[in-house]
Amino acid sequence: MNDYDLWFILLNINNKRKINLIKRFKSTREIWYYTVNECNDKQDKFNKKIKWEKDKIEFVKNLIFKNKINIITFMENDYPDILKNYDDSPFALFYKGNLKKLNESINISIVGSRACSPYGVNVTKIILKELKGHNINIISGLAKGIDYYAHLYAVENDMFTCGVLGCGIDVVYPKSNKKLYESILEKDGCIISQFMPGTQPLSYNFPLRNRIISGLSKITIVVEANLKSGSLITASAALDQGKEIIAVPGSIFSKNSLGTNKLIKDGAFPLTSIDDIFDLLSINHYDSKISGDERNMNNLEKKIYNVISDVPIHMDDIIKLTNIDISQIYELLFEMQIKDEIMCLSGNYYVKLNNNI
């Protein structure tokens, strides 16, 4: 990263104009010299501006060095290829972690309500469990709610995940996500921002952030959203970019489903099966799971497996129906989860991992 690049990043013009300039002149150095030549009659004034910019460049360089921040610009090879399709993409991205992975796998975004329900959390958990092992990256906004769980379950399933921030790369927002922020990087994930380091999470930053989330992704999955949710802004951006949207249907009585149900009414794909995602991605979803009768289970495991279905059932009900001692059933359920026969959802509910969703 040279001083010409930083000068251009700091230049107070919009991204669309920056992209057009870089396509025309090929380098920030050429843009700088062109600008100097155009300002001959205002040289003194321009020199003062350059001096001020140089001071700011040094400040930014020190901030980037101190916080171990990387920068990628539009003309570099590792800049996300999919973003180069849009003339309003950021000229530069500040990032930490493995940015290259965004160009090596299929990216899908998973977004939803900050005030999510157990239903939304459980659906997100199952989606991530089923997507594991298919060379799919998970993109989200590292916010509270569905964004948080999308990243969390991606990390737990050893999947690559990228958090797109609505603030500076050195600002963790919300602060409660600090551990998740660190976990993403520890698991070879990536965190990116188009905003200068130190930028606070101002409300008008997030619609811009949402365009990056959808822009990076082949499809966008909206798990839960009310009618004023920022997730609908992401969905709208995805539509503008020609992307497909999948919405998770929900109860007509739940405010968290008003937005997703409206998306479906307006033409979004309803998520009725995990295969809906694979069909849109043009990926063959070979279900290697075998039926309960063919599994190598002991009698107690079979007894538990037979009372669990694709409808979540609470632990207390499993104990009542199987009459297995509570001290023993926890160990059995844990073993069955390890073997990917069942899944534990939030609230101590369990479902089968065979043909669920």
Image (cartoon, rainbow, N blue to C red):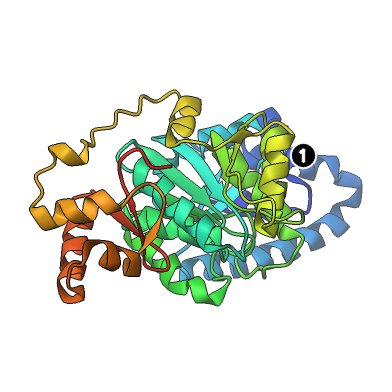
The residue positioned 28% from the left and 67% from the top of the image is: 320
**Under tag 1, what secondary structure?**
helix
Q: Is residue 106 above or below residue 40?
A: above
Which residue in the protein does label 1 denote? Answer: 17
Q: Is residue 19 visible?
A: no
Q: Pick whichever, 157 or 300, lies toward us.
A: 300
The residue positioned 61% from the left and 53% from the top of the image is: 224
Q: Pick whichever, 59 or 242, lies toward us.
A: 242
* Position of residue 102 in the picture relative to residue 56 (left or right): left
Instruction: Give coordinates of residue 163: x percent, y percent.
Output: 51, 55
The residue at the far right in this view is 41
The residue positioned 53% from the left and 48% from the top of the image is: 110
* Position of residue 156 in the picture relative to residue 169 (left or right): left
Q: Quadrant of residue 288?
A: top left
Classed neighbour count for the residue bearing mark 1: other residues with Cα under 10 Å, few (<14), some (14–19), many (≥20): few
Q: Is residue 94 visible?
A: yes
Q: Pick whichever, 210 or 288, lies toward us.
A: 288
Instruction: Say how many tags the image has.
Output: 1
Instruction: Give coordinates of residue 13: x percent, y percent.
Output: 79, 49
The residue positioned 77% from the left and 56% from the top of the image is: 228
Instruction: Give coordinates of residue 227: x percent, y percent.
Output: 76, 53
Instruction: Give coordinates of residue 245: x percent, y percent.
Output: 61, 36
Q: Is residue 343 above or below residue 87?
A: below
Q: Quadrant of residue 263?
A: top right
Q: Is residue 86 above or below residue 176?
A: above
* Position of residue 271 in the picture relative to residue 347 (left or right): right
Q: Pick whichever, 249 or 318, lies toward us.
A: 318
- Image quarter where the C terminus lies is top left
Q: Name the residue type under label 1.
A: Arg
